[in-house]
Image (cartoon, rainbow, N blue to C red):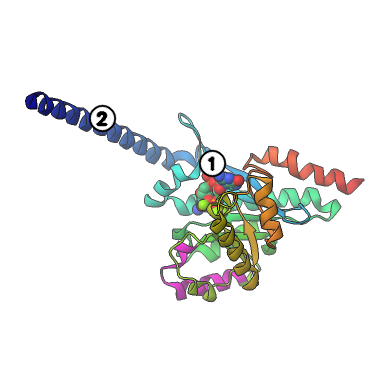
């Protein structure tokens, strides 16, 4: 009987190991495919920028959009950034990809601003920056160049940084960000509340917007302490005199809670999923033109 138990344990153990090694091999193959594909994705024009609207919490008016990168992979379909950006960062491609996103988003926004000029509507576009882009000395020059090439007014560009990007060399970084802010570019802190930076850092950076992470919004419906925390984060942003944005709004109850607590802007699936530019234009830009012409 003990022998049988021993035999079974060995057999299961072996299967388990085999299972894991197959799993691992699959992961390695996927990673290799992604890594190779990334090296040619730009020249093959496989990246796409999707847009998600940001709305005034009270009036519901569209104030701008966030540019979110996707990869139209030839075999694996449409990939979300979490599945390939960390790899792009590791193999040193993030700068090139980041600059492409920036140029694309600025050019698209100029196109929409031109369409909306007759009704006098302003919009801003937010572009995410990865930590390694922020520590590049070339970041400032890249931004200046893209703004010049596309003609987007600096005031209509917003750059989203994460707290974790601000940990290293905070004083050096503060100088770079000061220069960028001096152009008139808006700087926002993304995923606020989830990073590892100390709150003290915020004091040194020219941050104009705090984007409260969607995890705080998600817990609000069931959880009394979650409610208080979200409330406190909104108060913190407003008390610090920066614009508060709640991301990941999926339900009307979440929207109402944020609105009542004084959150300035709302973003989430409830209002708009990240969509292709052509769809964004049809759903969010053209209606503004129609309104303006009435
Ligand atoms: P993020 O900047 O915090 O963007 C918000 C993420 O939440 C997006 O995921 C968006 O699709 C998703 N989201 C928006 N509304 C909702 C909602 O109501 N519910 C839920 N559950 N999710 C919502 P996505 O597009 O997969 O992007 C993930 C992250 O990848 C972004 O987080 C950002 O950090 C990064 N990222 C995206 N595009 C770029 C880029 O061009 N450059 C860099 N460096 N990072 C990027
Ligand atoms: Mg963001
Ligand atoms: Mg975020
Ligand atoms: Mg995020």
| Mark 1 and mark 2 residues within 8 Å of each other at the beta carbon | no
Distance from mark 1 CB to nearest ligand 1 atom below 8 Å: yes
Q: Position of residue 117 (x, y in %)?
A: 82, 53
Residue 33 lies in magenta, yes or no? no
What residue is rendered at 42% in x and 48% in y? Answer: 88
In which quadrant is the C terminus drawn? top right
Q: Residue at horizontal 55%, vertical 51%?
A: 219
Q: Is residue 20 left or right of residue 97?
A: left
Residue 163: mark: none
Q: Which residue is at 45% across, 47% downward?
A: 85
Using the image, tell me which numbered label, if any, was put on residue 19.
2
Residue 87, relative to residue 265: is it above or below?
above
Residue furthest to the right in view is: 294
Which marked residue is nearer to the observer: mark 1 or mark 2? 2
Few, some or many residues within 10 Å of mark 2 (<14, 14–19, 20+): few
Which contiguous range is marked in magenta? 163-181
Q: Position of residue 51 (x, y in %)?
A: 64, 45
Is residue 183 visible to the viewer in this orientation of the structure? yes
Q: CA distance from mark 1 to mark 2?
A: 31 Å
Residue 214: give x, y in percent of width and height.
Answer: 56, 52
Q: Which residue is mark 1?
A: 70
């Amino acid at each position: 009987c003990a022998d049988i138990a021993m035999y079974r344990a060995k057999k299961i153990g072996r299967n388990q190991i085999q299972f894991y090694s197959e799993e691992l091999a699959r992961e390695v193959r996927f990673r290799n495919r992604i890594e190779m594909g990334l090296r040619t994705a730009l020249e093959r024009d496989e990246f796409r920028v999707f847009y998600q609207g940001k709305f005034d919490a009270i009036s519901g008016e569209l104030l701008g959009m966030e540019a979110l990168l996707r990869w139209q992979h030839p075999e694996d379909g449409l990939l979300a950034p979490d599945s390939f950006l960390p790899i792009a960062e590791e193999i040193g491609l993030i700068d090139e990809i980041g600059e492409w996103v920036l140029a694309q988003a600025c050019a698209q926004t100029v196109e929409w601003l031109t369409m909306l000029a007759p009704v006098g509507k302003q919009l801003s576009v937010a572009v995410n920056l990865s930590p390694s882009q922020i520590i590049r000395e070339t970041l400032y020059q890249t931004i200046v160049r893209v703004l010049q090439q596309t003609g987007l007014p600096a005031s209509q560009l917003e750059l989203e940084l994460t707290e974790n990007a601000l940990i290293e060399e905070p004083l050096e970084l503060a100088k770079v960000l000061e220069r960028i802010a001096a152009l008139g570019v808006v700087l926002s802190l993304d995923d606020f509340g989830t990073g590892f930076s100390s709150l003290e850092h915020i004091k040194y950076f020219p941050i104009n917007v705090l984007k409260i992470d969607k995890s705080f919004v998600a817990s609000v419906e069931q959880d009394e302490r979650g409610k208080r925390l979200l409330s406190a984060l909104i108060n913190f942003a407003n008390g610090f005199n920066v614009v508060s944005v709640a991301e990941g709004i999926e339900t009307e109850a979440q929207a109402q809670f944020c609105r009542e607590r004084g959150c300035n802007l709302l973003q989430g699936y409830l209002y708009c999923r990240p969509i292709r530019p052509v769809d964004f234009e049809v759903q969010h830009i053209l209606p503004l033109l129609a309104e303006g012409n009435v």
